[in-house]
Image: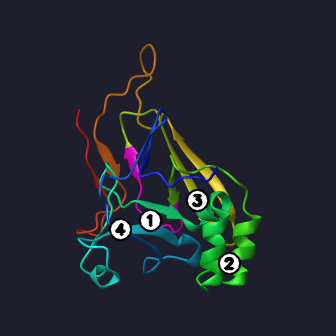
């Protein structure tokens, strides 16, 4: 039985892609990112024709972020697809050696960082945020921000804040903080 690339996966169920989706699966590396940050994305188009690729738009997840699967994830959980990317020359041999040496850890529910400038989101309504850092030289490390934004002065551990923090504003280029008390 083959594995499935899900559109969105929660702890209780996996959601399929929206019905009647016409899309192209493609490999992408964002400018300013290292090679190990390569990812598969889906570009939705109005018709099933490769000429419409440029006029399409990437599939977004329910939280507004782009749907993607990292090359790390594909290398560990979708070997035939990964092998095809290698055969097409998108994964050089030295990068393959790095990816092969990384441990297998399921990362779908975590935010992955590849550089110090990568954007991440902290949800204040949760006690913990888990970030995974992947580099070609340093391997894979996990960073957990636990109870960083909680109030433990009284009984128990209160979460007095709502909202989210984004470490970098694309329009301002500076950190922003959005909190609701």
Q: Nearer the viewer, mark 1 or mark 4?
A: 4
**Of pointers 2 and 4, the one earlier in the residue sequence:** 4
What separation in Å lies between label 1 and label 3 (alpha carbons)?
10 Å
Residue underneath mark 3: 133
Q: Is residue 44 left or right of residue 83?
A: left
Residue underneath mark 2: 95
**Of pointers 4 and 3, the one earlier in the residue sequence:** 4
Position in image of residue 119 (x %, y %): 40, 61
What separation in Å lies between label 3 and label 2 (alpha carbons)?
16 Å
Q: Which residues are magenta?
A: 113-122
Q: Are marks 1 and 2 in contact (CB under 8 Å)?
A: no
Q: Is residue 120 magenta?
A: yes
Question: What's the magenta bit mostly, secondary-structure-wise?
Answer: loop
Residue count near mark 3 (Cα–Cα under 10 Å), binned few <14, some 14–19, many ≥20: some
Provide the secondary structure element on which disc 1 rests: loop
What separation in Å lies between label 1 and label 4 (alpha carbons)?
27 Å
Q: Nearer the viewer, mark 3 or mark 2?
A: 2
Provide the secondary structure element on which disc 4 rests: strand
**Of pointers 1 and 3, the one earlier in the residue sequence:** 1
Q: Is residue 90 left or right of residue 181?
A: right
Q: Nearer the viewer, mark 1 or mark 2?
A: 2
Position of residue 44 relative to residue 109, above or below, is: below
At a point 29% along the width and 57% down the height, the residue shown is: 20
At a point 30% along the width and 33% down the height, the residue shown is: 161
Residue underneath mark 4: 23
| Residue in the foreground of this view, choosing between 103 and 11 | 11
Residue underneath mark 1: 118
Position of residue 79 relative to residue 105, above or below, is: below
Q: Is residue 94 left or right of residue 71?
A: right
């Amino acid at each position: 039985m083959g594995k499935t690339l899900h559109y969105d996966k929660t702890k209780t169920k996996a959601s399929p892609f929206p019905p009647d989706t016409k899309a192209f699966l493609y490999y992408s590396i964002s400018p300013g990112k290292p090679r190990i940050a390569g990812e598969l994305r889906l570009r939705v188009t109005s018709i099933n024709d490769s000429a419409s690729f440029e006029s399409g738009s990437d599939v977004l997840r329910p939280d507004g972020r782009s749907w993607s699967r990292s090359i790390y994830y594909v290398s560990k959980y979708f070997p035939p697809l990964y092998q095809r990317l290698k055969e097409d020359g998108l994964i050089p041999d030295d990068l393959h050696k790095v990816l092969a040496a990384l441990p297998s850890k399921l990362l779908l529910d975590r935010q992955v960082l590849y550089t110090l400038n990568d954007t991440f989101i902290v949800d204040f309504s949760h006690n913990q945020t888990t970030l995974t850092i992947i580099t070609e030289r340093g391997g894979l490390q996990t960073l957990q921000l636990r109870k960083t934004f909680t109030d433990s002065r009284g009984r128990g551990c209160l979460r007095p804040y709502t909202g989210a923090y984004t470490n970098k504003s694309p329009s301002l280029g500076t950190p922003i903080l959005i909190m609701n008390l």
